[in-house]
Image (spheres, rainbow, N blue to C red):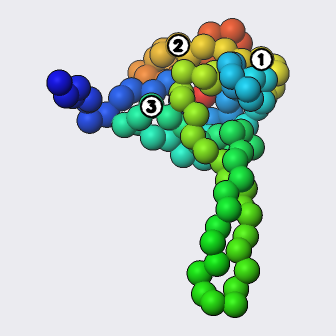
Amino acid sequence: MTIKTPARYKMHVKKGDTVQVISGAEKGKVGEILKTFPSTSKVLVKGVNIKTKHVKPQQEGESGQITTTEFPIHSSKVMVYSTKEKVASRIAYTLNPEGRKVRMLKKTGEILD
């Protein structure tokens, strides 16, 4: 049995948003979203879920390296974070005075877009 997945998932966060991790080993950490992966509903957050990778030498005589890189986490594990109020909040979609749909933080009323 094969499971068909939609081509694009709708995510509550965008690239450049400041988010706080709300569950898992990295709980409480705050960082900026560097990249989103809508097909898998994952996000890459700066300074979160850092793993070490051992890289083999590419040429003879060259030494190997140990690099640290951020790995994606699921988007449901993050909440948008207000840097002014220092609080994480859910998102509400409202219309601004020009009639454009914008994202707003429910706790603070802060407009994101």
Residue occupying image coordinates x 74% and y 29%: 26
Q: Amino acid at mark 1?
A: Val
Q: Nearer the viewer, mark 1 or mark 2?
A: 1
Residue placed most toward the observer, 24 or 77: 24
Residue extending furthest toward the bottom: 61
Instruction: Name the quadrant of the N terminus.
Output: top left
Residue 34 drawn above or below residue 43: below
Q: Amino acid at mark 3?
A: Ser
C-alpha distance separating marks 3 and 2: 19 Å
Label 1 secondary element: strand
Q: Which residue is mark 2?
A: 92
| Residue 9 percent coordinates (x, y) | 36, 29
Disc nearer the start of the sequence (1/3): 3
| Residue 45 percent coordinates (x, y) | 65, 40
Q: Which mark is residue 41?
A: 3
C-alpha distance separating marks 1 and 2: 15 Å
Is residue 38 in sight in this rendering? yes
Q: Which mark is residue 33?
A: none
Q: Nearer the viewer, mark 3 or mark 2?
A: 3
The picture quadrant where one finds residue 16 is: top right
Q: Amino acid at mark 2?
A: Ala
Residue placed most toward the observer, 111 or 42: 42
Residue occupying image coordinates x 72% and y 61%: 67
| Residue 77 percent coordinates (x, y) | 60, 22
Residue occupying image coordinates x 77% and y 17%: 87
The residue carrying pointer 1 sits among few (fewer than 14), some (14 to 19) or many (20 or more) residues within 10 Å by Cα, namely some
Residue 65 drawn above or below residue 97: below
C-alpha distance separating marks 1 and 3: 23 Å
